[in-house]
Image (cartoon, coloured by chain):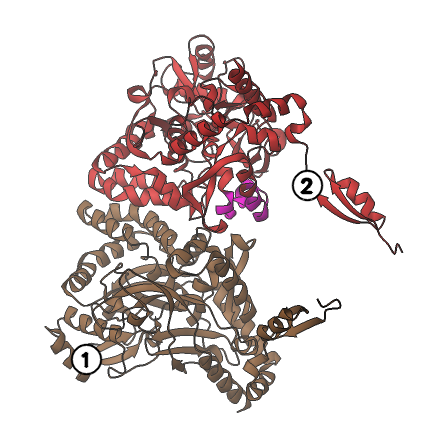
Chain colours: A brown, B red
Amino acid sequence: MNETPFRVINVGIPTFGETLRQQGAHVADVDWKPPAWGDPALIEYLERLEQPAVDQANAQVFERITTSRPHLVGVARASEVVPGMRPGVILHAGPPVSWEQMCGPMRGAVLGALIYEGWADTPAAAEEVARSQVEFRPCHEHDTVGPMAGIVSWSMPVFILENKTFGNRAYCTLNEGLGKVLRYGAYSREVIDRLKWMEDELGPALGRAIQESEGLDVRATIAQALHMGDECHNRNKAGTALFLKWIAPYLAETTDPGTASRVMRFIASNDHFFLNLSMPCCKAMMDAASNVPHSSVVTTMARNGREFGIRVSGTGNTWFTAPASSVRGLYFPGFGPEDANPDIGDSTITETAGIGGFAMAGAPAIVQFVGGTVHDAFAYTRAMYEITVGEHPVYTLPNLDFRGTPTGIDVRKVVSTGILPHINTGIAHKLAGVGQVGAGLVNPPREVFIKALTALAEYLRG
Amino acid sequence: MNETPFRVINVGIPTFGETLRQQGAHVADVDWKPPAWGDPALIEYLERLEQPAVDQANAQVFERITTSRPHLVGVARASEVVPGMRPGVILHAGPPVSWEQMCGPMRGAVLGALIYEGWADTPAAAEEVARSQVEFRPCHEHDTVGPMAGIVSWSMPVFILENKTFGNRAYCTLNEGLGKVLRYGAYSREVIDRLKWMEDELGPALGRAIQESEGLDVRATIAQALHMGDECHNRNKAGTALFLKWIAPYLAETTDPGTASRVMRFIASNDHFFLNLSMPCCKAMMDAASNVPHSSVVTTMARNGREFGIRVSGTGNTWFTAPASSVRGLYFPGFGPEDANPDIGDSTITETAGIGGFAMAGAPAIVQFVGGTVHDAFAYTRAMYEITVGEHPVYTLPNLDFRGTPTGIDVRKVVSTGILPHINTGIAHKLAGVGQVGAGLVNPPREVFIKALTALAEYLRG
């Protein structure tokens, strides 16, 4: 036996300490990583970006995010309200991507949209149209967000959210439910029929009801849902119930009983319905905080199923992209990791605005859907305070003594700490036409933050 | 400086340790209290009750509580369904109490009920009727529970809950909302008018909607609400939203649009609406577990505003009572502890069934309403595992790694540990006619458990 054991402080890689521990030493592990993944060039960029102008710009961005008050003010066809929506344009999730580069589920959703619009009769004909006649554009560049494939076409009804503080608007399609749905790349008859019903009955009924109301304060609804176990990305059970509680009386007053009851049942049967309000709320907040010179705050995180892209306030509309990651997931029976498409969708706008994966400490029940433990859920939120500008004054987490959600991802902090944003997400089958196969947890590729930091540093020198 | 400090283990009262600590000793405090508050007679009773027959009976009681499946199956007037409801009978919360002994808010509610029923025109006339012509009976002895004053009279609509496992039924009036309401002792014109509207429009509309449905599994709804930040006693925001989400389509289908919209707005405007479903659900569970010989499990905790009463499965319908405690509360503006009536109402049936104050670890946001800290909320639930038989297999708490709620208060454990049940509650003004003044936290008087333990021990000897 070693009677005078060494006392060791082990900094960094824990296995070094473990080896000493096995030889009888007392070892205290310090969880330390070299900043900026030990890259001297990045450390130099970080030093260059440690300046008051960046801090002040980030403070302004944080102020704009947290004072934004998006309200639901209507429902209309995309063609009527989405800027730049023309016949032949189809919007998709994530950074720009061509038909040739598109992943399976996004292609499937495009085929479905073309058949739904009557621009093609068969999947084969739709493929030809997609290849030669469609202009594909990112939702994010049209004030819009779309979950998963994020396909938005001419006739689809969209929610209209208006930022009452800054006047900007954001749009999102209506949530179709689970199972075989367009956003997961399915395009069978039932998918098209449901989209038609949403266009003909659901959208107009909701539009009439909202017109009768004074609009819904979506920020306030999210704040309530965060006290009710939602994180408003993959858990929207409370948000959906609160939305239906709000709109049900207006529906009863403005729509015939048969339609009202069908619309209510459709919403009541889909606990994710509120996602498509949470997302444009976050989009309206983040768009209001875009294009602030010098700011290193991330205003967009989005994936097209091939690439993960971010945009940063101080670098405007430039996308910084890298290959999308695989999701660590829980799979539906009969499916596994080999079926999964890489990370896809605009729904990471929720994490960009500080909820979703960033608010999992308030939504511990979500681990039954996306995996991990309750301890992880708390740890994810705590870690996100390390990489964000501040705490949202309205979005609070009772489980953390009502601390505000971690808001405003600072590219500098991500690179200096090496801590990547925590995202939770649905998982699409990698082939067109199948649909959702699970849900899980994922981090963005570090390269997008390295590219953004580099560009910002170069920009500030220039 | 003391170079060889004493190392002390201090058992019990912490101030002893503090004194030594100030003198430089290393003190480890052990949180120990003498069992049964140090009373030798109680320790003897406890020893007598440590027998397999009691354990087996408690296991059977636990099984009956946790396999109970109460469903909402209808709404009817109390006169049509509540057993023993006769003209001239008025039911009240808590153990039996006479008009002479009644507290202010319960008297106020009785006056309101008599005017509502048309049995008196004025408060003065109603007082005369109450004194001479009314037979007062505890709700609990009529398969019924009532929040706060708990007044149930002939014409009031009640929810009908049926325990699908054991066939027993439980009843509860419909929640009136907050502010000036009968259950808090208010009896002004607006209170009576609202009760009339509930009788004429709300009750029948809900009854038609429920008839059209297959009934609501209230146990399953509570299980969901517990994952959504409710503890289903003083926080019923999720339960109310889930209830409205469920019933809205049936309302639209069975009622004219004007009525449907008024009914929906009434429910949507009152986050406590679900309390009056949570309570009879718990009542149906606990009634199914009553009258099991030898069991030391509490089947009723209820207060009439003067006395706190419990009943225990193994001693049947006998009440064990002691003066009701004051509530440690948060008060509405303009009110304070001097305005508060002592603890009142049947809503402690929720804690009796293992939710409410026992499930506060799942409802941290409730501390904004009832006081205390988030840390307290977790500690309350953890402490309740010390005095209960087991963990509910269906009611789980994500915050505690999905541990089941602490279920089935064992009188033996309460007395041996000295840990009293944690209850959260509304606070009524002590005078008739005022209403709610706050909400807070309270424990039952220990005497009720001492009396019950004594009776059970005597009974087992006899």
Q: Residue furthest right?
A: B1
Residue A29 quadrant: bottom right
For the residues labelled 2 and 1, the Cα–Cα distance comes to: 72 Å
Q: Closer to the camera, B387 or A179?
A: B387
Residue B134 drawn above or below residue A104:
above
Decide whether residue B127 is among the magenta residues. Answer: no
Q: What element carries label 1?
A: helix
For residue A187, the mark is: none
Identify the main secondary structure in magenta. Answer: helix
Residue A362 drawn above or below residue B290:
below
Residue type at tag 2: Asp
- Other-residue count near label 1 (Cα within 10 Å), few / some / many at <14 / 14–19 / ≥20: many
B80 sits to left or right of A312: left
Q: Residue furthest left?
A: A121
The stretch in magenta equals B360-380
Residue type at tag 1: Ala
For residue B31, the mark is: 2
Q: Closer to the camera, B53 or B327?
A: B53
For residue A130, the mark is: 1
B165 sits to left or right of A14: left
Please state the total of marks drawn on the protein image. Answer: 2
Residue A149 in view here: no
| Position of residue A66 measured from the top left corner of the image (x, y, whole percent) | 50, 64
Decide whether residue B372 is among the magenta residues. Answer: yes
Residue B32 drawn above or below residue B341:
below
| Position of residue A122 measured from the top left corner of the image (x, y, whole percent) | 11, 73
Q: Which of marks 2 and 1 is in front?
A: 2
